[in-house]
Structure formats: C-alpha cells, structure tokens
Image (tube, grey):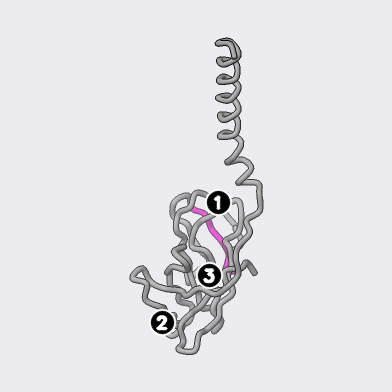
C-alpha cells in the first residue's frame, strides 16, 4: 500500500464517520420508539411508592416511573398519568387545576387535560400511561403508550 492510498482511505474513513455522526441523530429522531411492556411503580424521589390516596380531587403528584419524571392527575375521580417532560425542550410540566391544563413554564407551552398540545411551541402531546392501583393502594403505571 502506498502512502497516497493510505491517506485516501484515511480521509474516506474520516468523512464516512463524520457523515454517520451527523446522520445518526436525525435517524434516531425519525425512528419510532419501541417501549417494553410491564408495570412500574410510581415513586417519589426517595423511591417511596406513592399511594392513590395521596392525590386529592383535581390534585396532581409529580414523581418517577422507572427514573422518568411522571405526573399523575385525578380528574372526576379517575387517575390519569402522563410523562412530565415537555415535548418541546424537556422541561417539567405542572398541573394547573383551575384551568385544567398542564403548563410548561419554560416557553409557555400548554397541554389540555388529555395531554394534547394546545398552545406554545410543544410539537407533540405528552406521552400517556395506563394507571393500575396495586393491592396496597400504590400506583403502578403501564409503560406502554395508550
């Protein structure tokens, strides 16, 4: 192998890896996410399970589901669970009980009570989870989208 061939292959490899590094985030954004099924406990930051009794009518609780920020809201006696991560830039949303909306204070993003984006820059709705009440009243969430 000549020095010229070696340098040509080195430049080609460098350009190929650069192109791959540039295209990988684009493909990961466009590719659908496949989530594993199964239930996970809804816990506080100290990893203590949160009970359904702790959430009053029209109240909310932000906690973790498998290390991911999640919000559970009680509306009309029913518990609804959503990802607490705004779909715009990843800030944490909070529940505005008076307006019955999720609000992201970073860029004034708003989501209705079903997690659908209604105002501001968020491009997609909040991810929703199925709520299951465990034997001792603790909240468990199905990690699959519903």
Q: Considering the numbered disc 3 on the image, is that residue within a helix, a strand or a loop?
A: loop
Q: Nearer the viewer, residue 112 or 93?
A: 93
Name which of mark 1 and mark 2 comes first in the sequence.
2
Name which of mark 1 and mark 3 comes first in the sequence.
3
Residue, x 45% and y 54% (percent of image)? Answer: 91
Which span is picked out in magenta? 108-114
Residue, x 55% and y 20% (percent of image)? Answer: 10
**Residue 53, quarter of picture:** bottom left
Q: Which residue is mark 3?
A: 100
Name which of mark 2 and mark 3 comes first in the sequence.
2
Kindly indicate whether the residue at mark 2 contacts the one at mark 1 (C-beta within 8 angstroms).
no
- Point out the frontmost of discs 2 and 3: 2
Placement of 118 over or under 66, stated as above or below = above
Per the model, the C-alpha gap separating discs 1 and 3 is: 16 Å
Per the model, the C-alpha gap separating discs 1 and 2 is: 31 Å
Q: Which residue is mark 2?
A: 54
Say left or right for 117 vs 59: right
Disc sitting over residue 120 in the figure: 1
Q: Considering the numbered disc 1 on the image, is that residue within a helix, a strand or a loop?
A: loop
Residue, x 50% and y 85% (percent of image)? Answer: 134
Figure quadrant of the C terminus: bottom right
Kindly indicate whether the residue at mark 3 contacts the one at mark 1 (C-beta within 8 angstroms).
no
Q: Considering the numbered disc 2 on the image, is that residue within a helix, a strand or a loop?
A: helix
Residue, x 58% and y 11% (percent of image)? Answer: 2
Q: Can I make out residue 22 in this image?
A: yes
Residue farthest toward the left in the current orientation of the protein:
46
């Amino acid at each position: 192998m000549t020095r010229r061939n070696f340098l040509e292959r080195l430049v080609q490899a460098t350009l190929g890896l650069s192109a791959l590094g540039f295209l990988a985030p684009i493909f990961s954004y466009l590719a659908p996410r496949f989530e594993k099924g199964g239930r996970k406990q809804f816990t506080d930051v100290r990893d203590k399970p949160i009970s359904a009794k702790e959430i009053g009518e029209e109240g909310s609780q932000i906690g973790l589901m498998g290390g991911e920020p999640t919000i559970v809201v009680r509306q009309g006696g029913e518990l609804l669970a959503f990802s607490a991560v705004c779909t715009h830039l990843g800030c944490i949303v909070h529940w505005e009980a008076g307006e019955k909306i999720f609000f992201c204070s970073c860029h004034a993003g708003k989501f209705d009570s079903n997690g659908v984006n209604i105002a501001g820059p968020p491009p997609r709705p909040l991810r929703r989870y199925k709520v299951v009440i465990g034997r001792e009243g603790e909240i468990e969430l199905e990690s699959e989208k519903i």
